[in-house]
């Protein structure tokens, strides 16, 4: 049937088709060589115990790398009974009830589970264990990072876009300044913020917080675990909000001005106009920007790697670390495949929203 | 009267908001600039000063004498330039086919390119690393080729939309004059897309200049191939034992100023290119 169709094509059309394929060939060749084929080898390696630069024979291990990365268990922690009172022991210093150490309840065979965190529910104490706790933490941290930073960037980006979209003197200059954080290399902005977030009052943030009356000027943002994620998110929000604002600004400029004029004539105030006109009409642009940023945030690497190096990981920095520090191709590949599949789902969503028009 | 007062308050709040946004966006860079001109002792002073007491060029001098950083600059220029040129040449071929020619499988090709613009480079990291160590590919060459993974699909995608927008009549009249489609492409259409080539080229250059994951990983086998982001991430000073933040900030300023100037010159083009890449097909 294909041949019949081809015979029906004119000589010119056939030539055009041949030229088109010829001109696309270099692009597809490059994509196959640097993306599709390596992706295939990563899938393959993720099913082996491959270690780079070692003599260990490479063996097929099935899904055990994935099991190693993703195994999670929850166990109840039994209370420690005080022998004199017969009641649960209470810690002298903190006044908290004492439970057995997590290591006593977490399984050790066939794989050893390590403690990720503990929580209390309905008067009982539980421990979450994982065979690769750094990766489980990396998944949680990356997801928190993604949700919080994308939401903040969208809100701030919307505010900035609305401001820049209105008429005022110096608007062009303002639009250019918006590109400053965007133009700064991510590694450089991470280094800049690392300096500003310094643990003493040599750091800007500690100085400012102390002036406002928060903290003692000695907050070690990048060393204390409760401040690490907020610090990373602050850097990403600063760096990426302008990009978000630009995407939303493009959407705002598509809304015809007449709509606002008509609404003003009907007596709708600015707030009403925003919720009745701007927000609904901006929804496609917001949705596209949201998914686009989510795709980007899920594979975050630079900020985590520079600011927290090996103390805390994102999913991507975990995979890179396994590769370079331990030359562990199997685990690194499995982590990469996990990230790829996660992003793939979001990418499908994004492509469906954008669509393709061939003609 | 009341209306007038309301208006004035509104205006004042509006300008406060503008100033607040401006400070938020630009102040961190000012802080790097400020720190880069401080002496070692002033950098250690608490609380930090908002303007350097005795501005000094000492940090800049140290950075320009830092062999690793200067080599990083050279490497980055080589890698980013080659990647950009390669992506533009290969990409404009593909974009012409997708934007102006008729052939079967076009929709599929467009979907593939669009999907590739979102491809996470971490997914192929260990695969590329395996190839590079096995065949002893030079890290500079490895970076130039592997950066195609994000520059090429983006270039094709944006240029396709520019080609699509060029009127079909140009092609037809060229064909009537006896030009082959390929001659039409490089004699007539390519010059017309020059502005688009500049924009996409600039964006590809910045993306390559920015890249850290591949650069950090591939240059572990040869530290002399490190690019600017790697050099700045692993920056060590000549003398001080602590992290030499004065010099790091000077290095940050040096690599940022050229980009900020480019951004101010090509502002409108960059915005158009960025939004074309993400918002419309």
Image: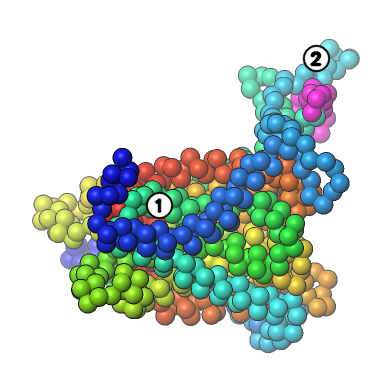
Q: Residue at x 41, y 42 (%)?
A: A349
Q: Is residue A312 left or right of residue B206?
A: right
Q: Residue at x 37, y 59 (%)?
A: A18
Using the rendered view, name the quadrant where residue B100 is placed: bottom left
Give how far across and how far down residue B207 sits, in percent: 53, 66
Using the rendered view, name the quadrant where residue A14 is placed: bottom left
Residue at image mark 2: A87
On the question of residue B173 being in view, the answer is yes
Helix, strand or loop for disc 2 = loop
On the question of residue A187 being in view, the answer is no
Give how far across and how far down residue A276 sits, in percent: 22, 47
Residue contact between numbered discs 1 and 2, judged by CB atoms under 8 Å: no
Q: Is residue B9 left or right of residue A183?
A: left
Q: Residue at x 27, y 59 (%)?
A: A11
Using the rendered view, name the quadrant where residue A132 is placed: top right
Between tags 1 and 2, which lies in front?
1
**Chain hosting mark 2:** A
Q: Residues within 10 Å of mark 2 (few under 14, many from 20)?
A: few
Nearest the eye: B218 or A22: A22
Q: Is residue A86 left or right of residue B261?
A: right
Within the magenta stretch, is there residue A347? Answer: no
Within the magenta stretch, is there residue A102? Answer: yes
Residue at image mark 1: B109
Q: Are marks 1 and 2 on the same chain?
A: no
Specify the quadrant that holds the C terminus of chain B.
bottom left
Residue most extreme to the top: A86
Extent of the magenta region:
A87-111
Give how far across and how far down residue A328 sits, in percent: 76, 46
Nearest the eye: B42 or B206: B206
């Amino acid at each position: 049937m294909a041949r019949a169709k081809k015979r029906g094509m004119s000589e010119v059309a056939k030539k055009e088709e041949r030229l088109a394929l010829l001109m696309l060939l270099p692009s597809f060749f490059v994509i196959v060589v640097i993306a599709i084929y390596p992706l295939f080898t990563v899938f393959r390696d993720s099913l082996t115990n491959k270690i780079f630069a070692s003599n260990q024979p490479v063996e097929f291990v099935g899904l055990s790398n994935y099991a190693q990365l993703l195994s999670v268990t929850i166990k109840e922690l039994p209370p420690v009974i005080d022998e004199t009172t017969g009641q649960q022991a209470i810690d002298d210093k903190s006044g908290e009830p004492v439970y057995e150490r997590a290591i006593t309840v977490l399984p050790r065979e066939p794989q050893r589970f390590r403690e990720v965190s503990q929580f209390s529910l309905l008067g009982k104490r539980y421990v979450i264990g994982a065979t690769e706790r750094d990766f489980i933490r990396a998944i949680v941290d990356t997801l928190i990072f993604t949700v919080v930073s994308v939401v903040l960037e969208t809100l701030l980006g919307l505010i900035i876009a609305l401001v820049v979209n209105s008429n005022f003197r110096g608007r062009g200059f303002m639009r250019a300044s918006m590109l400053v954080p965007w133009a700064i290399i991510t590694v450089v902005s991470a280094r800049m913020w690392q300096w500003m977030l310094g643990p003493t009052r040599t750091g800007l943030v500690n100085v400012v917080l102390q002036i406002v009356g928060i903290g003692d000027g000695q907050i070690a943002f990048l060393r204390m675990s409760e401040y690490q994620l907020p610090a990373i998110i602050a850097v990403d929000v600063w760096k990426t909000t302008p990009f978000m604002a630009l995407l939303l600004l493009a959407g705002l400029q598509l809304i015809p001005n007449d709509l606002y004029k008509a609404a003003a004539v009907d007596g709708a105030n600015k707030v009403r106009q925003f919720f009745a006109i701007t927000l609904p009409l901006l929804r496609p642009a917001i949705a596209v920007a949201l998914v686009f940023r989510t795709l980007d945030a899920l594979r975050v690497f630079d900020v985590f790697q520079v600011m927290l190096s090996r103390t805390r990981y994102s999913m991507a920095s975990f995979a890179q670390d396994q590769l370079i520090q331990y030359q562990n191709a199997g685990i690194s590949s499995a982590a990469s495949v996990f990230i790829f599949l996660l992003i793939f789902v979001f990418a499908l969503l994004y492509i469906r929203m954008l669509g393709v028009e061939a003609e | 009267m009341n209306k007038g007062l309301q208006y004035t308050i509104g205006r004042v709040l509006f300008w406060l908001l503008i100033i607040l946004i401006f400070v938020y966006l630009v102040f961190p860079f000012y802080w790097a600039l400020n720190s880069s001109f401080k002496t070692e002792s002033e950098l250690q002073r608490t609380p930090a000063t908002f303007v350097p007491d005795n501005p000094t060029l000492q940090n800049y001098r140290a950075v320009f004498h830092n062999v690793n950083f200067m080599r990083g600059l050279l490497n980055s220029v080589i890698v980013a330039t080659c990647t950009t040129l390669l992506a533009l040449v290969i990409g404009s071929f593909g974009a012409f086919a997708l934007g102006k020619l008729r052939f079967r499988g076009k929709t599929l090709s467009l979907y593939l390119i669009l999907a590739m613009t979102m491809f996470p480079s971490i997914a192929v990291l260990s695969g590329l690393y395996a190839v590079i160590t096995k065949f002893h590919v030079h890290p500079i060459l490895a970076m130039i080729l592997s950066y195609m993974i994000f520059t090429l699909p983006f270039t094709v995608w944006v240029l396709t939309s520019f080609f699509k927008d060029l009127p079909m009549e140009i092609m037809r009249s060229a064909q009537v004059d006896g030009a082959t489609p390929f001659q039409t492409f490089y004699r007539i259409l390519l010059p017309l897309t020059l502005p688009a080539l500049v924009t996409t080229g600039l964006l590809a250059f910045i993306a390559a200049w920015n890249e850290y994951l591949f650069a950090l990983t591939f240059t572990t086998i040869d530290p002399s191939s490190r690019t600017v982001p790697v050099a700045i991430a692993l920056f060590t000073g000549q003398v001080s034992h602590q992290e030499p933040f004065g010099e790091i900030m000077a290095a940050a300023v040096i690599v940022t100023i050229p980009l900020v100037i480019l951004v101010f010159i090509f502002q409108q083009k960059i915005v158009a290119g960025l939004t074309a890449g993400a918002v419309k097909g």
